[in-house]
Image (cartoon, grey):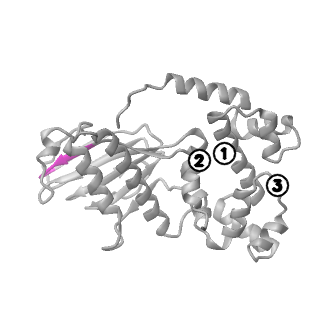
Amino acid sequence: MTPDRLSEALDLVEVRGVLTGGIAARGGWRGHGPLSDPVKFFALVSGRARLTTDGIDEPVDLAAGDVAILTGRSWVALEAGAEPRREVQPESDFSTDRFAHSDRRTDDIVIGGCINLNEAGRTLLLESLPPLAHIRPSGADDRLPAALLRLFDEATAQRPGSAFAIRQHGQLFLLELLRSYVDRRPLPSGWLRLLVDERLRPALDLLHDHPGRPWELEELARAAAMSRTTFAERFREAAGVPPLTYLGRWRMLLAQRALRNGDARVAALAEELGYGSESAFSTAFKRIVGESPLRYRTRMRQATLDRPRNTTP
């Protein structure tokens, strides 16, 4: 079976979609507020709305099924209908009458959420997304609108097990959202663009399957059936960094997962990932991650202990 590199990467960075709130209104309305999460999304379940955010020259008009992904923005404003527009406040509880008795034929319904990742993945995703990405359904076979409706229905129905179901539907919605995004080329240089470049796939498979090998550029170029220069240029254009720099970052992602989830000795991890000594590995880890492997492991374990045990989206 062909390796599914997108699934592999999403598992590694522990990507998770969290539903945070929404608006259900009709007529003329407006809502605005600050943003604190690095990556937010706003999806229109029904109706129409206009979205504005900092750093974007023109507002974005959203129709039913559309999703806007905002990266690194500090505020957002949404509005719909004619003047005069009344102020509405987003709600985090989808069981209120406003949502439970909303009518998709007449109401503007917006749901919002954030895309959470571990520290290892935050930079990877942020560098792959523009400040604002507007995703529109591509046709009748597009699965994103159906995933959005399932998520909204589960959030408003309040059936037994709804918290668990919302988490699962949130993950599926996020997957369809990322699929829709990567299908709308051209993508900016970064992680997602590299993962979907079929010409680079043979070389990427080598790097991901055997990260501890001392790969040479010529070997990787040969696997991709390109000259050394052409391969290096295409890889850098797709990933935003040279192949061997990417390999170093990939090794550190693997190292961070091992340190978070296991008890591997640092020396054994260094050998597994292709470093000549524990010292060389620790130096590389601190350069990329910002702290030593042992300090990282201690901090991650403490964060796990401090995390609330019962959380709901």
Quadrant of image for the C terminus? top left
The kind of secondary structure element at disc 3 is loop
Residue at figure coordinates x 77%, y 39% from the top left: 269
Q: Is residue 158 visible?
A: yes
The mark found on residue 12 in the picture is 2
Horizontal side of residue 37 vs 163, given as left or right: right
| Disc 3 packing (10 Å; few <14; some 14–19; many ≥20) | few
Q: Are marks 3 and 1 in contact (CB under 8 Å)?
A: no
Q: Nearer the viewer, mark 3 or mark 1?
A: 3
Start and end of the magenta stretch? 22-28
Residue type beneath disc 2: Leu
Residue denoted by label 3? 213
Q: Position of residue 238 (x, y in %)?
A: 64, 65
Q: Which of pointers 2 and 3 lies earlier in the amino acid sequence?
A: 2
Q: Are marks 2 and 1 in contact (CB under 8 Å)?
A: yes
Q: CA distance from mark 2 to mark 1?
A: 7 Å
Depth order, front residue of 254/160: 160
Residue type beneath disc 1: Leu
Q: CA distance from mark 3 to mark 1?
A: 16 Å
